[in-house]
Each structure stands twice: as C-alpha cells, then as structure tokens.
C-alpha cells in the first residue's frame, strides 16, 4: 500500500526548509526547531528533545521538496541506515546536507543525509526513494 501523496511545501514540527541550495548532486537546507511544538511536552517532561523519527521525516520531506522542483515525483521506500549522534533541542538551528546518487535504470534515489546543529552531528541517515507508484518493498 502506498502512503497518500504529501502536498509540498510542508511545515513539519515548525521546521520549514529555508535557504535550500543545490550544488551538483548535493542539497543543503536550514531550519529552526519550533520550541512551541506539541511534541516536546511528551519528549520528555523537564528535558525536551526532538524524537529521531522527526529528523527522518524532516529529511524525507526536504528531499521530496527538492526533487519535486526538479520534476521528480518520489516516495520514501526505505530507511537503509539511521544513526542518531546528539540530541536536538527546541530552538536548535538545523543544517541538512544531502548527497544524492540517482540510479537512472531503476529510478531509485539514494540519499546520504547529515543533519547537524551548532554542537555538531545530530543524525546520519541513508534514505531510498522510488518513483511514486513503483512500490516500496524495503
């Protein structure tokens, strides 16, 4: 079953990609984590941190936005690698750097993602996207 298409651009957790730039196969975006977002009281009372799944979602939506600007309609097929290095706190400034590798034969896009704050690396991800409707069989 395919997830419904996400209208883009989107705001996720108050993080709107801004200053999105491309240099060849690399995309860079910046965002601020909204300190007032509803996720923080539950993660965790007295020590609010952004759940890691939110970083995956932010990376996915940033990639979809960037690729849609290039005329590609993709969907997330797999999270192939995921390593969380440091916590992300309310108000943090995020820098997302994505290095793309497109397989023209299969239409698959592999993205190596580095998400960092001013304290250093927060997360390292490898995401796999496929053309919408080709089936995600991760």
Image (cartoon, grey):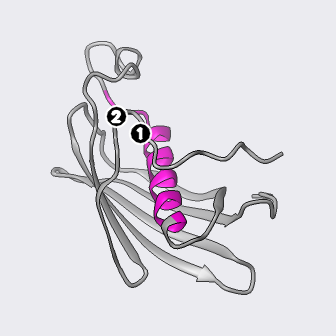
Q: Residue furthest left?
A: 118
The mark total stands at 2
Residue at image coords 49%, 76%: 100
In the rendered structure, does residue 102 fall within the stretch colored magenta? no
Residue at image coords 70%, 77%: 107
Residue at image coords 77%, 57%: 136
Name the mark on residue 11.
Answer: 1
130 relative to 57, above or below: below
Q: Is residue 14 left or right of residue 81?
A: left
In the rendered structure, does residue 63 fall within the stretch colored magenta? yes
> Are the residues flagged by discs 2 and 1 in contact, CB closer than 8 Å?
yes
- Residue range highlighted in magenta: 49-68
Q: Is residue 92 left or right of residue 104?
A: left
| Pick the front one: 88 or 11 | 11
| Pick the front one: 99 or 119 | 99
Look at the numbered disc 1 and give the secondary structure of its residue: loop
Residue 20: x and y, percent?
Answer: 32, 63
| Pick the front one: 60 or 83 | 60
- The residue where tag 2 is placed is 14
Residue 117: x and y, percent?
Answer: 22, 50
| Displayed quadrant of residue 32 | top left
Residue 118: x and y, percent?
Answer: 16, 51
| Displayed quadrant of residue 43 | top left
């Amino acid at each position: 079953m395919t997830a419904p298409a996400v209208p883009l651009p989107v705001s996720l957790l108050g993080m709107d990609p801004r200053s999105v730039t491309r240099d060849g196969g690399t995309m860079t975006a910046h965002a601020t984590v909204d300190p007032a977002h509803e996720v923080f009281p539950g993660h965790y009372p007295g020590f609010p941190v952004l759940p890691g799944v939110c970083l995956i979602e932010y990376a996915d939506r940033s990639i979809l936005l960037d690729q849609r600007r290039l005329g590609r309609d993709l969907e997330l097929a797999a999270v192939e690698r995921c390593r969380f290095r440091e916590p992300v706190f309310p108000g943090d400034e995020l820098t997302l750097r994505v290095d793309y590798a497109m397989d023209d034969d299969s239409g698959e896009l592999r993205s190596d993602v580095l998400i960092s704050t001013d304290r250093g690396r927060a997360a390292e991800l490898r995401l796999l996207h496929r053309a919408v409707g080709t089936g995600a069989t991760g």
